């Protein structure tokens, strides 16, 4: 009779682990810095109308920084939603459908955001 120590463990999942955890934290820091900087710009403006609000995003550097923050937001959202789908949705077909829908939604939001930003 063979002695088996411990239960045989089935290892599943993508095992993103530390790298994705760090990416989530890094994107959160980028977003936090961006929101604080944008908040300072808004507070400095005395009369906040559409003209003054849109003037914040006219310089090229402001558009580039906003695009970096947008990329951080989209990646942050993707990591979070992917983890939710992987952790709580067990049927593989449904999980894949939800992941593809999330990717399409985030891509549509990215295109729409870039269009809005470049119209200013």
Image: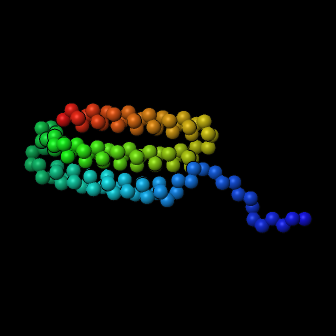
Left or right position of 7 against 68: right
- How is the structure coloured here? rainbow
Question: Residue 114, percent across and down?
Answer: 29, 36
Question: Residue 28, percent across and down?
Answer: 36, 55
Left or right position of 79 against 28: right
Left or right position of 63 against 16: left
98 vs 15, nearest the viewer: 15
Which residue sits at x=42%, y=55%?
Answer: 23
Left or right position of 108 against 40: right
Q: Quadrant of residue 90?
A: top right
Vertical order, 38 against 120 (above or below): below
Which residue sits at x=16%, y=51%?
Answer: 41
69 vs 88, nearest the viewer: 69
Question: Residue 87, percent across and down?
Answer: 56, 49
Which residue sits at x=21%, y=32%?
Answer: 119
6 vs 118, nearest the viewer: 118
In the rendered image, the quadrant that contains the N terminus is bottom right
Residue lying at the far right in this picture: please name it. Answer: 1
């Amino acid at each position: 009779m063979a002695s088996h120590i411990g239960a045989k463990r089935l290892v599943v999942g993508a095992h993103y682990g530390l790298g994705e955890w760090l990416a989530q934290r890094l994107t959160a820091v980028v977003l936090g810095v961006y929101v604080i900087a944008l908040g300072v710009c808004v507070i400095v403006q005395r009369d906040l109308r559409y003209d003054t609000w849109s003037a914040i995003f006219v310089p090229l550097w402001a558009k580039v920084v906003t695009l970096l923050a947008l990329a951080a937001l989209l990646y942050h959202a993707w990591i979070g939603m992917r983890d939710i789908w992987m952790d709580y949705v067990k049927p593989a077909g449904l999980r894949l459908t939800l992941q593809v829908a999330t990717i399409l939604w985030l891509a549509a939001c990215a295109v729409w955001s870039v269009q809005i930003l470049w119209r200013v």
